Image: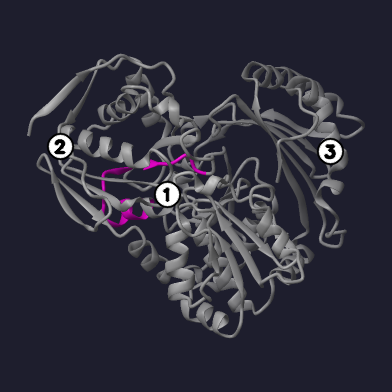
Amino acid sequence: MSIRTVATTPFSDQKPGTSGLRKRVTHFQQPNYVENFIQSLFDSLPGREGQTLVIGGDGRYFNDTVIQIAIRMAAANGFGKVMVGQGGILSTPAASHIIRHYNAFGGIVLSASHNPGGPDGDFGIKYNASNGGPAAEKITDAVYARSMEITRYKSVDTPDIDLGQIGVHDVAGMSVEVVDPVADYAALMETLFDFNAIAAMFAAGFTMRFDAMHAVTGPYAKAIIEGRLGAAEGTVINGVPLPDFGGGHPDPNLVHAKDLYDLMMSPDAPDFGAASDGDGDRNLIIGKDRFVTPSDSLALLAANAHLAPGYAKGLAGIARSMPTSAAADRVAHRLGIALYETPTGWKFFGNLLDSGQVTICGEESAGTGSDHVREKDGLWAVLLWLNILAARKQGVDEIVLEHWATYGRNYYSRHDYEEVDVDNAKALMTDLRTKLPALLANGLDGRKVILADDFSYNDPVDGSTATGQGLRIGFDDGSRIVFRLSGTGTVGATLRVYIERFEPSDGMHDRDTQEALADLIALADAVADIKARTGRDAPTVIT
């Protein structure tokens, strides 16, 4: 094998964020940009020689090019084998499963998740470790440090391999296996859920609409929902992954999946509606006349998980990200199990899952999952919902209302201000941080403040600490406002504001969410001076 060593110089902006390195496609297309980052990654992975690397992505524009680059660089850097999804396709949870199932060293996941694609869209590269989960900060920090001093990258001169056909290839002495991206994942789902009961429900006339948003879950949903479960052909729409997601924005929320929401609120609604995002790790759940917030979905799934065979023995614990509502806390308390509050980012759930301390995890950003993989999993959440519906023989609305009558309701909403000037966003957070001690002492607009801090997390498994994870203002009635700068955007800064109010089990549970939170929304704007700082009269997206 002839290894080609290419001289290069560092880029200053290759620090991975919450879910890897994300930039515009045009940014990644700069000469050596991709190669620098991948070489920095490989240089930060001791013990890679002879090991197996999994590679795949969500099918977005530029995936095919980067996969070929990564394969050649893996050969030059001593890997013994690469497993890659047919057509370059692997959903993020499927990639996690393949890493775990085949005891791979790790994997490269090419995606910018729910961000738009196409030549002018977004791209991303993320590394998942041997447990199948996103790399820990000690790895991403090492990658960034290496990227700042890199002087060369290594590759081999070989032709592109045919990703369209399943089979085994040789690339400069390294084995490259093109695998069915769906088969192993579908087999795993069949071990977790009662496919016979769900299929019987469909056979009895149950109807569903799943919007794959021309993203990665199309082939998975077609194979499982229409194939193995017998749902009618056409249940899965927008099921072919496209490099630009059909010109849409593959984020399963009420803005970008409005057509699905409108259908589910109409007289012609099917029994169940769902969607997933660009790389398949997020989900949207809607019943007839009932949108289920991600925070409520986490709580409902945890409360009913025992109805699925894979969780019949109960849950070890529940984990949620700090900005996610406290609805799951009430379920954990009733079940007598632990509840862990972590920073945002699925990597923070990894140690809890690996150590067996939790079974189900979730984030308010439409991500839920369990210990079956080490990523959030959109289709898994949909299938668990289907299992619950089949077992309880009730509709979504009835199940949600019964849950609130038992546990109370956490009215909850997230307001996103996207592509805000970075300096203005940072100044907003800095100034608000300085106000926190006074709020704790004096309250806010006549409300008693019992919590005002910058959230930090001490990992109970490895003892590591994560600081600066979001500003929290909590009131004595259980209400809460959280401010956080997101790490998933590619342009400017995204300010996320989370607003939450608890209504007890005997309270009013079916008010309009924005109406129920109106006073807290006004408080959030006032205390942080959002309009003046961002120049926005309203959020970009409300979920």
Magenta region includes residue 103: yes
> Could you say where residue 376 lies in the image, as x and y percent from the top left?
49, 51
Q: Disc 2 marks which residue? A: 158
Q: Rate crowding at label 2 as few (under 14), some (14 to 19) or many (20 or more) other CA atoms within 10 Å.
A: few
What residue type is disc 1 on?
Thr
Question: Looking at the image, is mark 2 or mark 3 nearer the viewer?
Answer: 2
Residue 167 is marked as none
Residue name at image x 25 percent, y 15 percent: 151
Quarter containing the N terminus: top left
Magenta region includes residue 303: no
Q: Disc 1 marks which residue? A: 92
Secondary structure under tag 1 reads helix
What residue type is disc 2 on?
Thr
Residue 520 is marked as 3
Over which residues does the magenta segment extend?
A: 96-113
Q: Rate crowding at label 3 as few (under 14), some (14 to 19) or many (20 or more) other CA atoms within 10 Å.
A: some
